[in-house]
């Protein structure tokens, strides 16, 4: 298949592009390098050094013989979007190209507005380009399990049958997102669903859990192919960040009671899920939602497990929760559609955490301790995120 | 109370400002005149001539002795928003200041993006300004009944109790909006609800039906105080537009089967509802939704009634529905909260339609027939709306 990966320079976009390329698909990657600029803004960097996109695709070609075609530009530039879709003529577009950090969106007004405009307008431009140029293109969009929030009932896959006052309908599952970033994904979901309805587009919204892990069979073929490893308080996500903290002996920072339960998955399963969605496209006019995760864990559970696996020298530290969220809550989410398509999950094993800690230890001289603590407070309208000293070089 | 009316130069914003002023509130109005620019863009104009805002407030002062303070600027300019909130120091902010036409948002990509960015960013700027300057300010936001779409179950007021797999929760009512404009209001609703949750703001989302009527006790005091009367295919709404068509002998254009049923209300009830929301504010941290309408009618019912009331010389014409919507559907929406606060509805009587037709006949030389027909097709990604010949002068 011809598959265009938007945000193909990012933590997941890059390994996804390689995975699809290795499996024989014709792959293009689109990126504006916005993600690298966020690092510059905050004075942080990926723990594992990453190459520029041009070098990455050149090395991929050298190592495997496969071509990945890069397109440099921004989705908020609709002329670029149209030109790229026209030139590459994809059968599927995998859309990772959004500002994806909840804390980043909560820094202040500017970052909230930036996140919503960037994500919503980029996706609108994409929907219009597909509708105008080729409505058969299948949009595979990265959403998030965070769109649902933490309702006191089971979370279904995008839709729920409701019986009310003697009548029944299947309606979009109610959304209670927990940051301006998560809200942007909810806005996208509503816009995409509408575009499918009016223009007959086909779309799959992948409501993804929190991803852990950093290595995939393709990224480890050569050091030039490695993907990002974020550990900072803004872009670092829970298990990856804990592994780095454990590696450098920094107490694991659990926010509040740590009863926050989140859907999660291994990075290798992200790649498999995206390919399954691509090769099993939605019907014309269909907007479907897959809950993309394999297991659920509480934050405290992950902290305790990381501490145990990494040898027990590490302590678990409770810090006041910088977010406004329930610290203890019911959580049960359904995920049946991706397993039905053939997903074979990599469940979380100690070896995965050990390998993350090992990687982190290898690069521990690059860790800026200042960047680990949470700096963005949901209750404030203005937080300071720039890290004193900045990131260490390679 | 000190009440700031955003969009205070518009069809409803202006009469609302006068109503609140006449009832002894200290009123400020904010407007960027974006609405007047849409007319220039399309070559259409209000059927009833309207004065500039500066003249309006001067005449209001002369006629009644009351002062309405104007603030000229755009909500997407956050510095202006902060300065205005700081200077006027309102207790309540009534927010009409959004692009409010579904067809306008569906013209093409540019108009869809403009509508969503304008509406979402303006509201985000407002939420931040309130949170930073005075979180006790009560935001009274105009939403729309169109946020709900046409589900096959009863529509509740913003939230619905759902029992699912043996557990129960009260969750946001699922949204199925029918245009990029309606989607922008859904995005706003989610953003506002979140701001109440994290910052303890107080907000009332008025999910308003389609408003009909043009005269209020205050606007009819002087010709300088009259409000807009839109009849064009883009900004004209159903009953007002039918009245103009009847007045000039233009067949009433029913879209498709005409079984589209919509919640509606008299313009005088809009003013009463907004004041009821202001004087009965939400609690700190509370996000509440009022369904703001009094009756429901199908489009065909309104066409037949307009034809009958206006003397039967007018025919009803069926045109292919330019929108993607159900032309026959279940519709039952709840509205209990505004009546509980004391709303006494003006139900639709023939005299109201007669008066609209009479007004339209008075200004019939200003009608541009070219502007009446629907020009925006939901199924197309690009429609042409500029009207040949433009609008006639006064």
Image (cartoon, coloured by chain):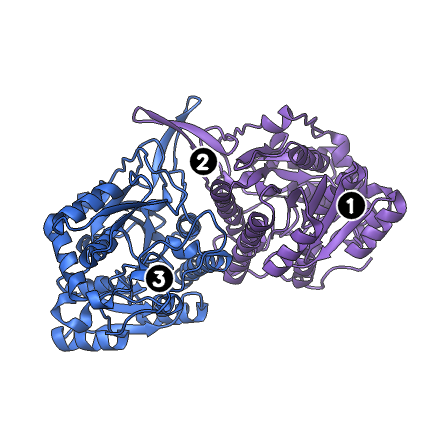
Chain colours: A purple, B blue
Mark 1–mark 2 Cα distance, whole angstroms, equals 41 Å
Q: Chain of mark 2?
A: A
List the residue tagged with mark 2.
Answer: A172
Residue projecting furthest to the top: B166
- Whether residue B255 sits left or right of residue B111 in the image: it is left
Do we see residue A139 in this rendering?
Answer: no
Q: Residue at x 69, y 62 (%)?
A: A40
- Whether residue A104 sits left or right of residue B243 in the image: it is right
Q: Residue at x 15, y 52 (%)?
A: B353
Do we see residue B362 in this rendering?
Answer: yes
Residue projecting furthest to the right: A62
List the residue tagged with mark 1.
Answer: A360
Query: Residue B217 in the image: x percent, y percent?
Result: 12, 62
Mark 1–mark 3 Cα distance, whole angstroms, equals 51 Å
Is disc 1 in contact with disc 2, using a CB cutoff of under 8 Å?
Answer: no
Which of labels 1 and 3 is toward the front?
3
Q: Secondary structure at mark 2?
A: strand
**Same subunit under labels 1 and 3?**
no
- Whether residue B306 sits left or right of residue A7 in the image: it is left
Which of labels 1 and 2 is toward the front?
2
Q: Chain of mark 3?
A: B
Query: Residue B390 in the image: x percent, y percent?
Result: 34, 69
């Amino acid at each position: 298949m011809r598959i265009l990966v938007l945000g193909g320079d990012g933590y997941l976009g890059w390994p996804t592009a390689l995975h699809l390329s290795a499996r024989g698909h014709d792959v293009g990657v689109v990126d504006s390098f916005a993600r690298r600029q966020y690092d510059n803004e905050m004075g942080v960097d990926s723990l594992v050094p990453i190459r520029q996109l041009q070098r990455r695709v050149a090395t991929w070609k050298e190592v495997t013989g496969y071509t990945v075609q890069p397109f440099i530009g921004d989705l908020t530039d609709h002329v670029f979007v149209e030109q790229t879709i026209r030139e590459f003529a994809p059968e599927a577009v995998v859309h990772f190209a959004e500002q994806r950090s909840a804390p980043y969106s909560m820094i202040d007004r500017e970052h909230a507005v930036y996140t919503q405009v960037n994500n919503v307008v980029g996706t609108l431009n994409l929907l219009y380009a597909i509708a105008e140029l080729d409505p058969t293109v299948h949009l595979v969009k990265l959403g998030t399990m965070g769109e649902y929030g933490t309702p006191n009932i089971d979370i279904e896959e995008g839709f729920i049958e409701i019986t009310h006052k003697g009548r029944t309908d299947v309606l979009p599952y109610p959304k209670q997102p927990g940051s301006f970033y998560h809200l942007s994904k909810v806005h996208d979901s509503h816009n995409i669903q509408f575009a499918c309805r009016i223009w007959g587009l086909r779309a799959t919204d992948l409501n993804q859990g929190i991803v852990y892990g950093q290595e995939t069979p393709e990224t480890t073929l050569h050091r030039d192919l490695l993907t990002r490893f974020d550990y900072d308080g803004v872009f670092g996500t829970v298990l990856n960040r804990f592994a780095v903290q454990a590696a450098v002996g920094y107490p694991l920072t659990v926010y509040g009671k740590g009863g926050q339960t989140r859907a999660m998955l291994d990075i290798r399963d992200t790649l498999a899920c995206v390919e399954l969605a691509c090769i099993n496209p939605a019907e014309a006019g269909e907007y479907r939602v897959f809950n993309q995760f394999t297991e659920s864990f509480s934050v405290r559970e992950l902290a305790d497990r990381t501490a145990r696996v990494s040898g027990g020298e590490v302590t678990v530290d409770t810090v006041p929760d910088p977010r406004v969220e329930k610290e203890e809550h019911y959580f049960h989410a359904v995920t049946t559609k991706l397993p039905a398509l053939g997903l074979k999950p990599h469940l979380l094993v100690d070896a995965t955490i050990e390998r993350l800690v090992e990687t982190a230890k290898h690069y521990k001289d690059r860790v800026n301790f200042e960047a680990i603590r949470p700096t963005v407070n949901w209750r404030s309208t203005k937080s300071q995120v720039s890290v004193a000293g900045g990131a260490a070089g390679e």
